[in-house]
Image (cartoon, helix red, strand yellow):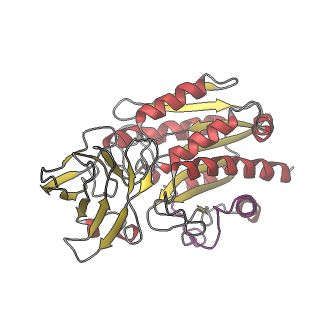
Amino acid sequence: MSTTPIQIDAAFDSGNIEVLSIAGATARLAIRKDAHSDFYQWFHFRVARAQGRELTLKITGLAGSAYPDGWPGYRAAVSEDRDFWGRADSSYDAGEDGGTLTIRYRPDGNLAWFAYFAPYSMERHHDLVAAMAEADGVDYRVLGYSLEGQAIDCLELGEGPKQVWLYARQHPGESMAEWWMEGALECLTDPADPIARRLRQLCRFHIVPNANPDGSCRGHLRTNAAGMNLNREWAEPSADKSPEVLAIRNAMDASGVDFAMDVHGDEAIPHVFLAGFEGIPSWTEVQQGGFDRYKAILKRRTPDFQTRHGYPVAGKGRANLAMSTNQVAERFGCTAMTLEMPFKDNDDLPCPAQGWSPERSKLLGRDCLGALLEWLEGAA
């Protein structure tokens, strides 16, 4: 049995880990905080010299992470080819070393990658944007630039009057959101898909697959390069701290919004759910009825969605207008919502091999579009 120490590194796109110690095939690790903030939960690292060895990887200090309730019942994502992402045996002990997640895995090959969720790299993002920009009927534009000069990419398609905005990864560690985007874009650009054909007749889509490219590259959980949580910047976005939000909101002001979905992932809740805008000052029963009807349609269309579990509903007039769904619903009088997918498994339909996965995220993107078409035609 080899006693050579394993090697661990994370100096790559969305990488995040600090190596505290290594002894043989056992390592003690910690997650680096987002720059200029105290948020941390996302990890992504590579282990070498791993072939056939029982790895024991201990990520410590997690009681102080952004969402400590996210660790019980969680299993780390793992891949040996960076294509298929499964799950490794994982356990959480709140009393060990400031809260420790212990990951155990025996790779077949020399290399194994571990992540909080299957990563969606910036290289894959650029490939997605390039492929979709070449599809028939798709217009591409740059809405603005991030603090570090990365483009806020927007793909637009459809000839209809309804203005639909879909945007993801305000929180960069929620990589399932861009997997969802990939599924939705593949559906919308498929010339043979009847749902897509009809949606393009009814709507003009404005799609931002990654609203926070800087945080994505840096391996952040929730913030941009300045440490700003973009989903708390919508009331007063600024060019010096949150230009990403400012660019998107300005573009929304120019187009108007009839329907908006902000795509996210939730660390603690093992379900797919939607959050609405119930506490906005201008709330109406008609507006609420549109949201409730969309939820009912999506629940009927896919067993991956449910309405029993989710966030507490804000009381009358108590919505936080710095959050995008509340701001957009208030600003445009439209139906807006936040879609949340789990980092863990979906307890309504568990998958022992993968938990919630890129594949499930992509399929949910298609289901959400199918629900949108039914919602629009039912409103006619």
The span picked out in magenta is: 296-321
Q: Along the line of sight, which residue is nearer the eye, 166 or 55? A: 55
**Image side of residue 233 versus residue 12, left or right:** right
Q: Along the line of sight, which residue is nearer the eye, 358 or 292? A: 358
Q: Residue at x 62, y 56 (%)?
A: 337
Quadrant in the picture for residue 139 = top right
| Residue 253 in view, yes or no | no
The verdict on residue 313 being magenta is: yes
**Image side of residue 177 versus residue 16, left or right:** right
The verdict on residue 23 being magenta is: no
Extreme residue in the right direction: 380
Main secondary structure of the magenta stretch: loop
Extreme residue in the front direction: 1
Q: How many marks?
A: 0
Q: Is residue 319 above or below residue 220?
A: below
Quadrant in the picture for residue 26 = bottom left
The image shows residue 344 at horizontal and vertical percentages of 46, 63
The N terminus, quarter of image: bottom left
| Residue 49 in view, yes or no | yes
Q: Along the line of sight, which residue is nearer the eye, 363 or 275? A: 363
The image shows residue 207 at horizontal and vertical percentages of 59, 37
Q: Is residue 69 above or below residue 204?
A: below
**Image side of residue 214 versus residue 134, left or right:** left
